[in-house]
Amino acid sequence: MRRFVIGQAKNLIDQSRRQHLHPLKNLRLLSLLPPFSAPPDSSLPVFSSRLLSSSSSEMSASDSSSSLPVTLDSINPKVLKCEYAVRGEIVNIAQKLQEDLKTNKDAYPFDEIIYCNIGNPQSLGQQPITFFREVLALCSHTALLDESATHGLFSSDSIERAWKILDQIPGKATGAYSHSQGIKGLRDAIAAGIEARDGFPADPNDIFMTDGASPGVHMMMQLLISSEKDGILCPIPQYPLYSASIALHGGSLVPYYLDEASGWGLEISELKKQLEDAKSNGITVRALAVINPGNPTGQVLSEENQRDIVNFCKEEGLVLLADEVYQENVYVPDKKFHSFKKIARSMGYGEKDVCLVSFQSISKGYYGECGKRGGYMEITGFTSDVREQIYKVASVNLCSNISGQILASLVMSPPKPGDDSYESYIAEKEGILSSLAKRAKTLEEALNKLEGITCNRAEGAMYLFPCIHLPEKAIAAAEAAKTSPDTFYCKRLLNATGIVVVPGSGFRQVPGTWHFRCTILPQEDKIPAIVNRLTEFHKSFMDEFRN
Amino acid sequence: MRRFVIGQAKNLIDQSRRQHLHPLKNLRLLSLLPPFSAPPDSSLPVFSSRLLSSSSSEMSASDSSSSLPVTLDSINPKVLKCEYAVRGEIVNIAQKLQEDLKTNKDAYPFDEIIYCNIGNPQSLGQQPITFFREVLALCSHTALLDESATHGLFSSDSIERAWKILDQIPGKATGAYSHSQGIKGLRDAIAAGIEARDGFPADPNDIFMTDGASPGVHMMMQLLISSEKDGILCPIPQYPLYSASIALHGGSLVPYYLDEASGWGLEISELKKQLEDAKSNGITVRALAVINPGNPTGQVLSEENQRDIVNFCKEEGLVLLADEVYQENVYVPDKKFHSFKKIARSMGYGEKDVCLVSFQSISKGYYGECGKRGGYMEITGFTSDVREQIYKVASVNLCSNISGQILASLVMSPPKPGDDSYESYIAEKEGILSSLAKRAKTLEEALNKLEGITCNRAEGAMYLFPCIHLPEKAIAAAEAAKTSPDTFYCKRLLNATGIVVVPGSGFRQVPGTWHFRCTILPQEDKIPAIVNRLTEFHKSFMDEFRN
């Protein structure tokens, strides 16, 4: 046992050393560690600090299996390095609490866990769009289409649409692997939807359908990153899929900071500065990732800003990775979503001028079909030989799931005026979006009333990302607990209220500032109670730690 | 233009040089190139030779976009190195033929393209299992469960099962992201199915549900491979997912040859020899991949052989990666499928003795639900800290698709005697499996009648992998056409008959031998015509090239 403990400690030290003695470690812009740097222990990644805090039980678990061949120091260090706080430590604690609540209700000052950590609308009661699910059911069990009773159970346009989709699938076989990019007829529908949205042509051959947006992002990172010398410009704060994917593929995240004071503004001067810094450190920056509307920051970019970004990518020879999964989620009348492709085309830039990938997902918008795992990327401005390589990598995984493909085509071609479902579809869609706007506003106002909290408005997406000005005593207490101050705050919030949010350090933030991400997704009738619980907790937290 | 052509040619040369001047290139066991090595051109990977053959048109395509930032020499060389012939060159030609057939029917000596390249049963007319699709439709559009008319349209046990599944999903939300490993209740059903199959306990916490088996294989490769010094023992011939995934993760494929003469026997002495060779070349072998029933080789391992394999992994400290996706596809009375976990447990080895990953998929068996992308891996013998890393990587992708998860639970817990659907379910299942056995036999016998072709029986899986003894003149003709002899044969077969098969070099084979993989999946009524076309083509091919 003792020998094993020593071995285990050595592994942790080695692991930490690997992270700290990285050949490029002195470049702040390259560090994949959270920016918080004092005290030293807290600078370990979320997962490593978790390992430290619970290592004794894990050591004994490992010890009894010590003859097994796979250990932390024999696995791929890129896996160790990768972090994903959206389902990290806080969520693990929440899941354990939820289990314990079942039998131990009296032990807690709350009745349920409210998961505000992740953009997962249907898990919090949002209902799916009826038309989409009708079509999906008919395509799942096509024998229904031959039954007369079906006409009493389904809208007539869902039946028509199911037939149309089946006609587009070779042999009507929804259980067959499709073309590696997705079923051609469904890509036609998506391309038509993009054209209708943008007013510029879209080519179905540019569409690669994916199981949600995440596999598309991974595919592009895999293509663009050969080594740690390859950099990807990412916003800070960012959605941690980007940092996780860059870590898994062994590249370097080149951060550019969004300006919180100007509503999370994206400044070209900051992009230029960070690009130059990266270059002078031997990094070749391959791409710029932009999330619009922003995650976790919720801002919607202006057209002018988007044009500047397109020009920056063109001048610097960068691929523009446009995360546009929240394109339907805009809540303020003074902002509107414009795809980067529309912006580029309206500037006169064609296929040969700008290298652009747009990611879309069925998990967000008003549909929120997260569990169905559908999405696509639209790839323009790549040469045919590079596209062939993307096609090859897509082929290794055969195809994305057909239900997700069908839904992706439906969100890009929903019912039209005159269709049997049109009115109910519009009522469902607008009900969801207007309610989300209301919830965003209520939560934002409540947060801004709290001592030491400032919160930009959520112009779009599904999140608020308030800044917490934590008292010195709270920071010292976090230090003593060997955790980052925002994690300390979020854990206390969870334990006091059952509300699950994600610490800002999981998204990165300007060093010395602290935030958390909270979704706007709990149903409207739950919002007042959430506001009360949050307000009460925050007050008592500040009372405890106020300097 | 001229400058660009020179640049492009340089890229191709550099690319080829990168492949050939690999620091470890002299080790045959490490080479990711097909084993055929003369003439030199044919030793390029399938995709590279394709690039060479069509480079002039692509150069001009690239030329017109020469200001774009992403080029073949700037992308990740691991992507370039990866090959996947199952959807490679021959299939691309077939797709073009199929398009052309629509308008140009008279130009071809056949009416349709028959895709025997891939195990995709429903694309060739196999019908899905009714019960599975009923449950899926009800879970897709849950409002159906409240309608009385539904009882007239669905079997009563499908309705019961849908309710049961919905009760296992938090909030009955089939549109929500699930737990990163998959819905707990569905994993319970899978674990119970594994227990019923094996007679040994299974733990739902060991199940990681995946979008088909492929993402599970990628996840394990990502975990186990840190660099080209990490090796994975793979059968030759192998399913090219393994070589592709190892290439994408930058590891080394350590081949072990199956013995064609003894029905694709897997010899422990061969495993030992290749392991020692790899060690002496500085490779740390991390895992042994075994495909049982075999793909593309169709053999079913004996229990004794499986015990020897388990002992080999235990002694050598290897993870056993057991590809068991064809577990329902056994066609001969003298063979039976046994999972490696059952074998290990029956030898008295528990959680702490053997490190084992079993992959299962909904794409194969009698269900063939390829397009639904479902599957799972059962992971045993990993320490809790390593499992935590696997969980983290699964979390980055949030979860596999819920329709696939539901189907995975259904294939592991189908209707039971007494259930409303039981009899029709058994009739559908047995109809499919007995027809597959018949088709396998017919095709095997037909192939064995052809001059110079020998074909082992398909004891299981979905493929025949005949050996073609090609005449010298055919080999010379392939050389002149700058392609491998088996690719040459398969292209000629496609152009003469419309039948799509995959050259053996896509799976690798003993150097100097030639094969192709042909599925047994065309519907029974098509088999006689396929046999005739194949026989006629082969006769005329041999007449043309016989020495």
Image (cartoon, coloured by chain):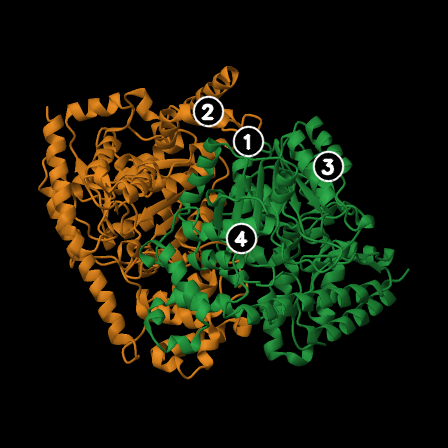
Chain colours: A green, B orange
- Chain ID at mark 1: B
Up-down: is B290 above or below B467?
below
Q: Nearer the viewer, mark 2 or mark 1?
A: 2
User: Which residue corresponds to mark 2?
Assistant: B60
How far apart, in angstroms, are the residues tagged by discs 2 and 4?
31 Å
x and y percentages locating residue B46 in the rendered image: 35, 32
Q: Residues within 10 Å of mark 4 (few under 14, many from 20)?
A: some
Q: Is disc 2 placed on a helix, strand or loop?
A: helix
How far apart, in angstroms, are the residues tagged by discs 2 and 1?
16 Å
Q: Amino acid at mark 2?
A: Ser
Q: Is residue A10 visible?
A: no
How far apart, in angstroms, are the residues tagged by discs 4 and 1?
27 Å
- Chain ID at mark 4: A
Up-down: is A241 above or below B109?
below
x and y percentages locating residue B119 in the rendered image: 30, 50
In the depicted view, which residue is nearer to us: B324 or B516? Answer: B516
